[in-house]
Image (cartoon, grey):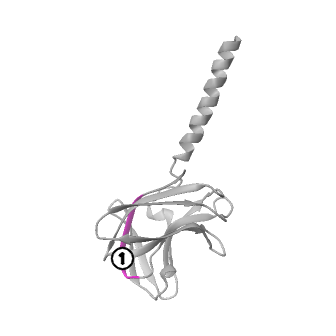
Amino acid sequence: MNRSTWTVALAFLVAGGLVAVAADKGKNLLKDPNKTESWRLEQHEQAKATMKADQDGILFDVTNVDGENWHVQAFLTGIDFKEGKEYTFTYKAKGDPARTIIAAAGIDEDDWHGVGLQEDVELTKDWKEQTHTFKAENVAKAGKNRIGFLMGTDKGKVWVKDLSLTEK
């Protein structure tokens, strides 16, 4: 190959690498979030809930509460947050009756601290797209982070679907 052919080849490889990096940034980091087996539903103390696939997403039915919002929680686990990076978490949600839940991201090991997202989400009986952008801080090692919802404040149903987590 002559010099100009090598230059074009190198430019193509560099551009290809940049495109690959850009593609990863827009990639959904959640694996099968519309399947129940991707979720971990936690019930603590007297709080109770069920989970099932419904309406192209997941239905969480909180049947008993005991005054602590974190006593019913559901998380997608195994997430590899990178320290200091910004993320966008989007999904559609609704509740019956209308209610408030908390969208949260944290580490998935003892001491369970948050890593940058803890926001109230107002739900109505109609689907509404939700978007949260946050900077990940104090993350755990790769695969030991989680994102999801605290729902133990009120009895009732919460539906979520079309979940996506992307690095900005």
Residue 2 drawn at (x, y percent): 70, 10
Residue 130 drawn at (x, y percent): 40, 61
Q: Is residue 34 visible?
A: no
Inspect the image, locate mark 1, and give the three-letter code of the amino acid beneath it: Arg
Residue 51 drawn at (x, y percent): 41, 72
Residue 11 drawn at (x, y percent): 63, 24
Q: Quadrant of the N terminus?
A: top right
Q: Is residue 137 visible?
A: yes
Q: Is residue 160 magenta?
A: yes
Taking the image as shown, residue 70 lies to the left or right of residue 110, namely left
Q: Main secondary structure of the magenta part?
A: strand
In the displayed structure, would residue 116 be above or below residue 166?
A: below
Q: Which residues are magenta?
A: 154-162
Q: Which residue is mark 1?
A: 99
Where disc 1 sits, the SS reads: strand
Q: Residue furthest top?
A: 2
Q: Residue at x 67, y 19 (%)?
A: 7
Q: Residue at x 61, y 64 (%)?
A: 145
Q: Residue at x 46, y 88 (%)?
A: 67
Taking the image as shown, residue 3 lies to the left or right of residue 32, namely right
Q: Is residue 90 magenta?
A: no
| Quadrant in the picture for residue 162 | bottom left
Q: Nearer the viewer, residue 57 or 37?
A: 57
State the count of labels.
Answer: 1
| Crowd band around label 1 with a 10 angstrom C-alpha radius: few (<14), some (14–19), many (20+) | some
| Quadrant in the picture for residue 124 | bottom left
